[in-house]
Amino acid sequence: MSKVAVIGAVVVIGLGVVGGGGYYYASQQAEKKFQQKIELIKNTFPGATITYANHNIGIFSQEATMDKVVIKYKDGEVYTADKVSAVMGSDDDIKNLKIDQLAVKEKETATEQLFTVEHTEIANAKADAGWIVIESGKIKKIVPSKISFGLLNFQNLEFKPDTNTNIKVAQYQIKNYGLSQKSDMLLNNLSATGRSDFSIKSFKIDQVNLADISKRQEAFFADRKNYRSSEALNKGLLQNLSMMQFGLLNIEDLQFKDKYGPAFQIARYHTKDYGLDKKTDILLQNLTVKDSRQNLSIGSFKIDQINLANMLKIQSEFVANENDRKSINDKAKEIFQLLSKMQFSLLSIDKVIVEEYKSAFKLAHYQMKDYGVDRKTSQSLKDFSVVIPYFSKIVVSLASFESSGVDAATFIGMLESIDLNNLDNFGKNYTNILQDYAKKVGGIVNTGSVSGLKISFGKEFISLGTLTTKSDMTKEGNSNETYALDGLEFSVPDVSGSDLLNALKQMGYRQVSVSGRLTMQYQMNTNFLSVSLKELTFKDIGAISATLQANAPLSISYDSPETILTNPEVKLKELSVVMQNNGVVERLLKSASQEQGTTEAEVKESIIASVKEVAQKDKDIPASFTEDLVKTLKAFLQNPQVTKIKLSSMPTSPISGAVLDDKSSEEQFNLLNIKIQAVPIKH
């Protein structure tokens, strides 16, 4: 026999001999340790008794098993379990603990169980010193941050706090809980019934710093002054939320219903990648809220790549102390600052409906893309409507709205400089901000459109086909703006005391349709302003065209027409207004002749005579202008289809309103070079 075989046989025999005694010694030690654990529980809770039918200790597995366990506390509470098995480590460690059919009764004689769990499992659990505070045999406080475990799992949990309330959970599980660990939490099929019914099909959160959050919360509530005021609580909550981190939060089929109040339901809520300096995605689907007065529903709410945790941190810094009172100006600045620091790639809302009594609000779709500093933001809206049950029901609807090209976050941030306590120079300040914004972003190109706007109140309405806008501004401050209006229509209402509206009614106008185009240009280096209104056309009525050229520095205040007209730096270069007939003159002559029982020629003479009389009585109108006015009116009424009226002012040199203050009316007309004349229409 080889040496190796001999040595091997000796080792095996030796182990067998020693092992027999070793097994006996180990079993005795395990039993002793088991009894020590039982005594520890009894000593921890004075007056508690622990009984069990039998127990078994596996020497090699280090697993202790007890059947039919009963724990009674001196206050009457009774804990029972069909089976408890545990693999213990040191005094404060549990490698594995399993409990089957755990039940809790408030009193031993109670007919119903307060709390039951079909199966409980804890793995790799450890408790640091001070994790639990017990006084007079009762648990006073548990410190969650001093606990860690690899697994906590409950199956089929039921809790009955009173005869009318029942709470059930099919599964509740946490993995990898502890400081500096990322935990996974899962809850399936939670239901709570009673006066209010509440249920969640699934709640899941992955990679959350749960123990770290617990530690911060413990530190916060350790200082009593932190929860003496709503301000302190709000600040603490925001700070804690901003420090939270998780990879995924998902909630499925959440429902709440109060038997005498509202009902609330969410099909799905999903949040991904939350934490400081992270870009978070949020999705909410099929939200409904109902009560006796109001119904709300949202088909979908989505926001992608938002710096949500950073926003909560900033907001926590704005929370005032208990005795501080912020002004409206301070609050506005905080809002502007918060909005300017927000970032997201997409915000979309779909199928929003709010109904209350006879009023309603509906929105098919709203979207905002690329919001944040140094980003060009775009917006779009589809099918918006509001119903207000006042004045025979007011209905407002909008088919679409679109806007793009503005770095909205940068612009909003610059609004912080506006002093809301002093609005006297608001126009000037806003203009300066706009100029500074253009310099900062290297120029502005903004486009927008509105279509299908309608406002109705009873039988009357105002509607808009389309309104398109384009605004260009260079970094030097030169601007070019265009506004195109098409299909603006409104009904002609019956209004007592309105001669114009009543006259339109008498002439057969039941509604008015308007279209036109306005352009505005400004040159910063010369302060040159040019405004052009190209044929603001009123269908079957007439048209107005106008041009304005002036020197108008942006450095002055534009808060009121009076300050503009009297400022010596604002100088008029040219003004012209052209009025053209498209049918209103013919209707006016016909209506007046029928009402007065005269011919249309006599009506014309009557109009001319009335205008002449009014002009002659007005001391602010020179005789020479009155003469030109009468001559122009005669020529226009003679051939309204081929003639238009032109009113113009072309000073020999740019002139300001301040120069005209001490001049007579005739001198003012001469300095402004005001003329009126009838000119032929060129076809």
Image: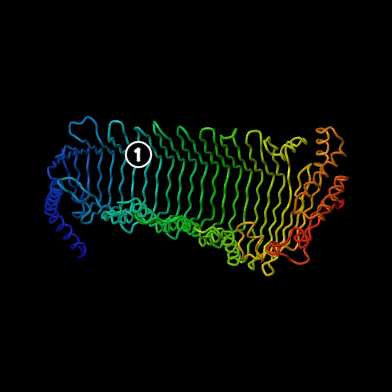
Density class for disc 1 (Cα within 10 Å; few <14, some 14-19, many ≥20) is some
* Spot occupied by residue 103 in the image (x, y as percentages of width and height): 24, 37
Residue 335, position in %: x, y? 48, 56
Percent across and percent down for residue 336 are 50, 58
The vertical placement of 264 against 468, above or below, is above
| Image color mode | rainbow
Image quarter where the N terminus lies is bottom left
Relative to the observer, which residue lies in front, 77 or 27? Answer: 77
**Outermost residue, bottom side:** 525
Could you tell me which residue is drawn at 21 percent across and 36 percent down? Answer: 106
Measuring from the top left, give residue 457's x and y in whole percent: 62, 36
- Is 451 left, or right, of 93 in this rendering? right
Secondary structure under the numbered disc 1 in the rendered image? strand
Q: How many marks?
A: 1
Q: Is residue 407 left or right of residue 627?
A: left
State the residue in front, 616 or 155: 616
Look at the picture and state if 1 lies above or below 360. below
Residue under the point 72% across and 47% down: 486
Give the labeled residue for mark 1: 170
